[in-house]
Image (cartoon, grey):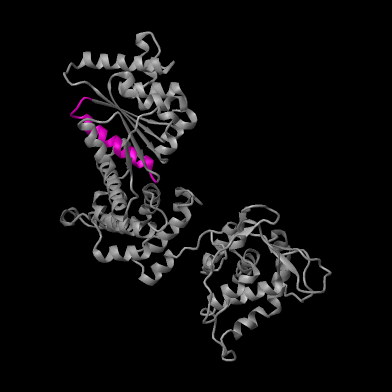
Amino acid sequence: MVSDIVAAAIETCPPPFIFINDPLSPALTARAIESSCAQTAEHQRIRTAHLSAVNCFTTRLFYDTALNSFANWMPDWDNDCQNWGTSHNRKFNDSFDSFLHGLATLDAEISSATPSSTPTRYIVTIENAERLRDNLPELVVPLTRLAELSRLDVCVIFISVCRWEDLHPSLGASPDPLYLDVPPAFNDDIHDILCSEFERLCQAFQHGIDGIFEDTTVSPFNPVFIPLYSSFADAICTVGMPTTRNPEDILYVASTRWPGFVKPILDEYEQRLAEYQAIIEGTDQNMSLNSEVPRLEAPSELVRMRLLKLFTGSISAAFDDLHPRKSDATTWAREHVTPDNLLSMPFVEAQGAMTMPPPSASPTLGQLPQIYQYILVASYIASTNPQRTDLRMFGRGVDEKKRKPRSMKIAGTTGAGSKIGQHLQGPSAFPLDRMIAILGALLEENDADSRPKKLEFKVPGEYTDSEIGRTSILAIVSLFQHTSFIIPLTDVLHHKVTELTRMKLLHRTSQADRLDGPPQYKCGISFDITQSLARGLRVQLQDILYHPM
């Protein structure tokens, strides 16, 4: 581990300049190094200062934050929010020279307060060091030579997502650092990080820090859940590692899903506690003394395996929504509440209760009949995919070609040209018969098993042809635009004309009086809405898009 190497260097003889490259999670690395420095400072004369180049965007902020951290000084209302050093009747934040004088003054105060033959060692950790190049470029060279300029035992640590070759000044003004490269985290590493964070929260639960936990027993961060959380962390890593290797993103999803994961156990405990209270109130005092008070215990192996199987799909959905930040943790947890008394349900019923369709982007779209939703998905595919790929995407044959996304060049450009994908050029017009063909392929692939069996249809695909050939389908399509086909509509479809016309989910691009060829349309819904509808229909949208997103 990089933090162990840095801790060993700080304890012995640290170099004046260390550069750590962590392209995935620099904040996590900074916290690990800060924790290692704090442990080392307990038995050595070490003063640490942890700064962020994002927060310290001016030189005054940088100097004041560093000196306050070294002096363990916290500005508050009692001292009029003054920084350290105001008692010396001079400012140590005017320039880099005044900052060096401030370091020398601070070192003299520390030496006089606690005399020792060992000089005080100062560790400066700068997170997001790549921001120094843009905000404070004049500090890069002096900070790398801080030990030489201050004549103190100083070690400066840069933590950045960029490499030193991209940040170092020209002409060799900065010395070469001790370069440490943080490797990407593996499954076991992230599992250990998750478990250590949970144990830290459990310690906070035991001590009741700042009154965070109102109930001292019924809490998802009870220490009895540490073995269960280890299995939960395994499931989180297994599902999330193909998506991201950033430990912070996986921690974000785990913290969102864990309260819902442990909720069935807490519900069962509260139910047993209520039954115990009812027994106590309904019996005399002698019998109540012999009753055993229910205790919150770790679940059995059978319950653990059942919970993991029930929540696997929910964890995958959490990564799909939370990793790209389509939703925040609070909103997602509120929309995906675990059903009450989940463990008391039969497994099939519990599995159905956990299969929660994602909320639609519009409440009206969620209320559309199933065939309407299939038409919208087929329209989006027809507007996004090139027409030449329909046979490759939906055709069935022995010699199928593998789908290979391609890019399109803008006409009229010279040289290599700018490549723009088909999905980035907006919806394209498509003929109605093409959309109906795609609709038939979707129905045959995803809806064939759920239909009632009819004896008159014996050939595969015959029932689908009859469904997409009905006038009701063409009438439904006509409702999405201002002009409709001359087809008799039922009373139910007449009731939907005004609402679906106002929604403008499809846009007609061809003239209404055009007689040659099928009418042309464009899809009027976004990818997010289409993906939401496809999930409700259990259609694998990414597998049938020419350019998956």
Rendered position, 463 above or below 181: below
Q: Is residue 385 visible?
A: yes
> Residue 77's spot in the image, x, y percent?
39, 19
Rendered position, 462 above or below 266: below
Query: Looking at the image, which is closer to me, 328 or 40?
Result: 40
Q: 239 left or right of 532?
A: left
Q: Is residue 55 magenta?
A: no
> Residue 242's spot in the image, x, y percent?
40, 59
> Residue 132's spot in the image, x, y percent?
45, 31
> Residue 140's spot in the image, x, y percent?
42, 28
Query: Looking at the image, which is closer to me, 102 or 299?
Result: 102
Q: 448 left or right of 125?
A: right
Identify which residue is drawn at 29% across, 65% down: 305
Residue stretch rendered in magenta on the structure: 24-45
Q: 126 left or right of 12?
A: right
Q: Residue furthest right?
A: 513
Q: 482 left or right of 452?
A: right
Principal SS element in the magenta part? Answer: helix
Query: Looking at the image, which is closer to me, 45 or 465?
Result: 45
Identify which residue is drawn at 37% across, 21% down: 75
Q: Is residue 27 magenta?
A: yes
Q: Can you tell which quarter of the image residue 84 is in?
A: top left
